[in-house]
Amino acid sequence: MRLWRQRTDVRCRYYSHLLKERFSVDSPVMQAHALYKLDDPHDHSLDGKPLRMVVHPAVLRMGTHDADKYDESQVWAKAVVWLDA
């Protein structure tokens, strides 16, 4: 019997990894929490605000199922963040 296995490396990005970043609505790694009602992708009113808390970490995939390209990442889930006032 042959077992299937994923050869990608899954990594999470927590508050400590995102601490020095400022919020941007165009960020590929984070999004504002739903309480900010930031439904318009062209609304840049919260850009530049520091992060207060990461509600859900970002989940990234490193590498491919062919066990190569470990220097490239793909975001599977963006971090959900609360912002400082």
Image (cartoon, rainbow, N blue to C red):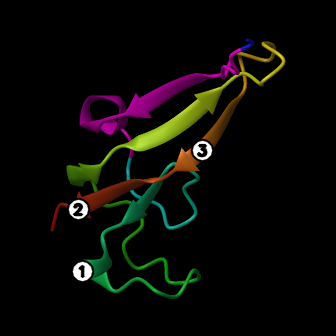
Labels 1 and 3 touching (C-beta < 8 A): no
Asked where in the image residue 3 lies, by quadrant, the reply is top right
Q: Classify residue 37 as left or right of residue 25.
A: left
> Residue 5, percent across and down?
66, 19
Report the residue marked by disc 2. 82
Foreground mark, 2 or 3, reads 3
In what element is the residue under mark 1?
helix
**Where does residue 15 sit, x and y in percent of width and height?**
26, 37
Closer to us: 37 or 45: 37
**Which residue carries the number 1 mark?**
35
**Circle 3: element type:** strand
> Along the horizontal axis of the image, is 40 left or right of 33?
right
Residue 74 placement, left or right of 44 = right
- Number of numbered discs: 3
* Residue 20 highlighted magenta (yes or no): yes
Q: Amino acid at mark 3?
A: Val
| Position of residue 50 in the picture relative to residue 44 (left or right) | left
Q: Nearer the viewer, residue 59 or 47?
A: 59
Q: Amino acid at mark 2?
A: Trp
Which residue is depicted at the point 23% across and 62% down?
Answer: 83
Label 3 crowding class (10 Å Cα cut-off): few <14, some 14-19, many 20+? some
Q: Which residue is mark 3?
A: 75
Q: Which residues are magenta?
A: 3-21
Cα separation between marks 1 and 3? 23 Å
Q: Of label 1 and label 3, which has the lower sequence position?
A: 1
Location of the C terminus by quadrant is bottom left
Q: Position of residue 65 (x, y in %)?
A: 78, 24
Depth check: 83 or 76 in front?
Answer: 76
Amino acid at pointer 1: Leu
